[in-house]
């Protein structure tokens, strides 16, 4: 009997895109992030992608102390792989973006593979009442914002986190050129396979949420990396479930979570990250596929193990 293919579910628990006024279910405090992450792991997520929020008003923060208010608690309650952002939030310096990763030495971090426009400003027009004064300016500032990830930045992160601390990366590719940027860094010897490539659709400034683009990104990655990578997909907002379902059908892994979409269905807010994880798990299993455990995900991605982190 043929072995079923394993599918890694990543859950992006809070992110730095959505603001508190957009959903009452968005985790903001260390307690909420811990609860949301653990529940997502129990629902089937083997990787937890984590940002931090200022517990006073929910704005994204790079403060390692805030990360340390929830990371050890998550590790105590679940074996899931912890994946820390290096993207941070709007306007953070590279030093700020990397501070928590240097402090916590996680098994994985995200790594955005190119500088880009990152437009969130249209979302400001959809919110009728704001909970906090920072939210509207934060979103509107992205009309004149470039998310910086230069080749020098990539080289520094790969050397210091990868070579220095044994961190593996979730290579976030928002457009076709980002795949070629990764191939360039591979050719220069900065990272070694297996590569965990997260192709991202539907962010204003990146490749659009068109299923033809999904096919093209997959074909391009196959051409550049052959059998040396694990492919994963996320899509913003209403495109989330259809894109990750297609990715699973096409041999890929999936990412869901309230960072990427606040909804569980048309017009219906997700009440938790676990709701989205449970939904995509049902879909994966209905496709006669199996969800990877944290142990299996570590083997697939050659991670250093949870006993070698700094939290």
Image (cartoon, helix red, strand yellow):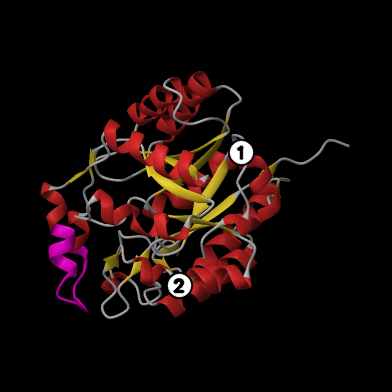
CB contact under 8 Å: marks 1 and 2: no
Residue depicted at x 26% and y 35%: 150
Magenta-tinted stretch: 125-140
Residue 245 locus on image (x, y percent): 55, 45
Q: Would residue 100 appear left or right of 298 to someone viewing this image?
A: left
Residue sitting nearer the eye, 60 or 280? 60
**Does 244 lie within the magenta span?**
no
Of the image marks 1 and 2, the number of the one nearer the N terminus: 2
* Residue carrying label 2: 33
Residue depicted at x 25% and y 37%: 115
Q: Secondary structure at mark 1?
A: helix
Q: Secondary structure at mark 2?
A: helix
Which marked residue is nearer to the observer: mark 1 or mark 2? 2
Quadrant placement of the N terminus: top right
**Does 136 lie within the magenta span?**
yes
Label 2 Cα neighbours within 10 Å, binned few <14 / some 14-19 / many ≥20: many
| Residue most extreme to the right | 1
Q: Would residue 208 appear left or right of 193 to someone viewing this image?
A: left
Residue sitting nearer the eye, 10 or 125? 10
Q: From this view, report whether residue 254 is shown above or below residue 149.
A: below
Residue 34 locus on image (x, y percent): 50, 73
Residue sitting nearer the eye, 96 or 260? 96
The answer for how far apart the CA atoms under marks 1 and 2 are is 30 Å
Give the mark count. Answer: 2
Residue depicted at x 65% and y 63%: 79
* Residue carrying label 1: 249
Residue 68 locus on image (x, y percent): 44, 70
Residue sitting nearer the eye, 235 or 310? 310
């Amino acid at each position: 009997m043929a072995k079923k293919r394993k599918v890694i579910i990543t859950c992006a628990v809070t992110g730095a895109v959505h603001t508190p006024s957009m959903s009452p279910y968005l985790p903001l405090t260390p307690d909420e992030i811990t609860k949301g992450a653990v529940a997502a792991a129990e629902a089937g997520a083997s990787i937890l992608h984590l940002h931090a929020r200022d517990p006073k008003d929910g704005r994204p923060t790079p403060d390692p102390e805030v990360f340390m208010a929830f990371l050890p608690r998550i590790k105590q309650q679940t074996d899931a792989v912890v994946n820390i952002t290096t993207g941070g939030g709007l306007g953070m310096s590279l030093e700020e973006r990397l501070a928590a990763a240097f402090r916590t030495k996680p098994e994985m971090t995200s790594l955005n593979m190119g500088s880009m426009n990152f437009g969130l400003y249209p979302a400001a027009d959809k919110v009728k009442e704001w909970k906090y004064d920072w939210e509207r300016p934060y979103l509107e500032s992205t009309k004149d914002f470039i998310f910086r990830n230069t080749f020098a930045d990539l080289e520094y992160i790969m050397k210091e986190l990868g070579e220095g601390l044994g961190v593996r990366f979730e290579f976030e590719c928002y457009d076709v050129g980002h795949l070629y940027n990764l191939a360039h860094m591979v050719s220069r010897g900065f990272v070694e396979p297996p590569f965990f490539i997260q192709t991202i659709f539907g962010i204003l400034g990146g490749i659009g949420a068109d299923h033809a683009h999904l096919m093209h990104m997959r074909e391009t990655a196959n051409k550049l990396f052959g059998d040396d990578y694990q492919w994963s997909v996320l899509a913003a907002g209403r495109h989330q479930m259809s894109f990750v379902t297609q990715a699973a059908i096409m041999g890929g892994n999936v990412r869901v979570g309230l960072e990427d979409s606040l909804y569980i269905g048309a017009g219906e807010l997700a009440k938790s990250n676990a709701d989205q994880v449970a939904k995509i798990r049902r879909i994966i299993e209905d496709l006669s596929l199996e969800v990877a455990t944290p142990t299996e995900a570590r083997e697939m991605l050659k991670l250093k193990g949870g006993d070698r982190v700094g939290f």
